Amino acid sequence: MKRVACVYIPHFVAEVERQRHETEMRPLLIAEGERVLGACARAAGMGVVEGEAVSEAVAHCPDACVIPADPPRYAAAWDALVEMLGRHSPGVEPERWGLAYLDATGLGRVYGDEESWCLLVRQQAWGEVRVKVQAGVAGNKFAAWVAARSGQFGPGYRVVSPGGDRAYLASFPVDWLPLEREPLRRLGLLGIHTIGQFAALSTAAVAEQLGGECLPAHRLARGRDERPIHAQPQQMLEAYVEFAVPEARLEPLAAALAAASGRLLRDLKRGNLAVRRVELEARFADGEAAVESAWVGDLLAPHRLDVVLRELLGRLGGDGQGVMEAWLRLVGLEPWVGRQMDLFAHAAGRQRMEGALRALARKHSAACVVRACLVDPHTPLSQGHRFALREVCP
Amino acid sequence: MTNTDDASLDDVIDAARLRYGQRALFRGRGMRSPAVPVLPTGFGEVDDLLGIGGLPQGRITELVGTGTSGRGTLVARTLALAQRAGRQAVYVDLARSIDLDTLARAEVSFDGLVILRPLGFGHALEMIRDLLTEGSAGVIVLDRLDGRSEGPERPDPDLLDRALREWNTLLSRSLCALIVLTEVLSPHTYPSDYTLPYFASVRLDLAWQGWLAPAGPPAARDPLTGFTARVTVLKNKLWSSEGRSLVVRVPVLEG
């Protein structure tokens, strides 16, 4: 049976900022320009809404501490969290900062039960990214999101038993459904306040009273959400090597890891994937463990992996202790072709650069800012007329 | 160490970092490779030698060497790869010696390349500062700082020092990689009054080693296929690879 997990961090940006401003007792407002990018739970409770003007937010929450936004920091934290989630699910769909859906089918058997999975994910998210996540597991995305959202009341996670989605949703307020303000107002007038009451209405009645655009929400209320998980490609490949006798010599270790990496390299080649980082974890005979990693940021050929492995093995140390087990991980996989063909993603940067160049040409003279162009590819080099330099118009 | 002690130490470290900054102190066992964004050089061995996968962004890299040491090819390939990653490339042609042919052969796109031709050393420093202040350049190459001349054309070390201090601050807020090419006869003759070695995060010395010719019996007019160059890491603040060196094959780039 299909199972979906939802990992939800209600005030993600504020949670990340809280790491830096741990001693700050006042409510946090994170401002990006004139707008509020994020607010902590206390500020949200006082009426601050993300996206509103900072001046309005401060009016709602006068004693708030306003912090300038640092989006790269939030993106890095989110990437780290998604990478961690990728280790616990075959498919992760990051919807936005603070919300991700995971394919949880069969995870219960792997982790003992789904509650154990939720606990582990919460612990690792706190250990690695220092954010408190709420987790929910159900039969579809909406029910999983509701379960995760309601996880704040209790242990931080909720597991909905298989087939029990509709019954579980019934008691939650109807405004948790994706409905516009007007249908919600009309439902209120009709005395319908819970998802269960809304689900009990017939489809024809919903279409007649609220319009056809409310039918998707009606299906969600009945526990029917067919949206699939659009998982990112697997973020990590892993190989495991176990040694019967602790191995401390470099050459046999490198050879064993190279042999184990054959499958990973084949998968990379088949998927034309580039690798960001190679990580090597080893457990030594004395029970100690060590992790080393190296940046690659490129396609990974066998000879290059060999160089990286030897470097990592050299740095592992271990005080002469032999290695009992080793895990080789290729982390941060991304399509190489996609990187090569990224033609339009940088248009904004190019436009900014053009503006900067015009300003530079105005300030320093147009003759100082030039571009090269190919005039005649067939001209011999000795004549020096293959290329020309053209000034940038100020 | 018990788990309780370990947790207490973690708390102390967190508190110290909160007060003095994230890079104030580290635990040895938790050290990872630095998460420094880099530009690959196109020479896999050099990237591996550096340990961080390429030339660091947001920092200054100095390439020291003479003519025919592979600096031009390394820079051209770096620019080409940076452009593929969507970075805007700027070449500050202070020496008026830009080799457009090498850049074209390394597949540098001229559409995304800007060449600055400053009127003098001070002017070059000012233009670079303006570019860094604006913040849209992804990689800037300064070609070149002359470490040989002793006459009036020699760059003013004080001017350079002031500029480097300013650039360092501006770079730390951006993802721009600043690559400075320095011309010296050998690392031992590097001008002692230049502070660039202090400000650069990565310094590489490149030296010509020998020519590469096609395999087989020698012929009278065999074309050379390239040359070998020794790359030595003079300084690397981001990885412990100082003093390491290797010989790379620098091929003649096909047109």
Image (cartoon, rainbow, N blue to C red):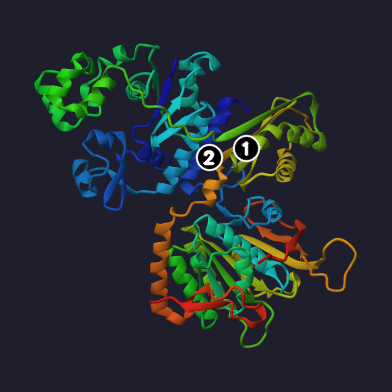
Residue A85 higher or lower than A27, as above or below: above
Q: Circles 2 and 1: CB distance less than 8 Å? A: no
Q: Would residue A383 be found to the left or right of residue A334 on screen?
A: right
As drawn, the label of residue A360 is: none
The residues bearing labels 2 and 1 have C-alpha atoms spaced at a distance of: 44 Å
x, y percent for residue A211: 16, 27
- Residue A193 makes an appearance in the image: no
In the rendered view, tell whether residue B78 sits above or below residue B120.
above
Q: Mark 1 highlights which residue?
A: A270
Residue drawn where x is 35% and y is 11% of the image: A164
Helix or strand or loop: what does disc 1 sit on? helix
The answer to whether residue A334 is visible is: yes
Q: Which mark is residue B13?
A: 2
User: Label 1 sits on what residue type?
Assistant: Arg
Q: Quadrant of residue B196?
A: bottom right
> Within 10 angstroms of label 2, few (less than 14), some, or many (20 or more) residues?
some
Q: Chain of mark 2?
A: B
Q: Work out whether A15 lies above or below A188.
A: below
Quarter of the picture containing the N terminus of chain A is: top left
Quadrant location of residue A13?
top left
- Quadrant (top left, top right, bottom left, bottom right) of the C terminus of chain A: bottom left
Whether labels 2 and 1 belong to a single chain: the reply is no
* Furthest-bottom residue in this view: B152
Residue A223: x %, y % from top left: 31, 17
Q: Amino acid at mark 2?
A: Ile
User: Which secondary structure lies at badge 2?
Assistant: helix
* Residue placed most toward the observer, B245 or A315: B245
Rendered location of residue A323, percent (x, y): 75, 29
Q: The residue marked by circle 1 belongs to what chain? A: A
Q: Residue at x 26, y 35 (%)?
A: A44
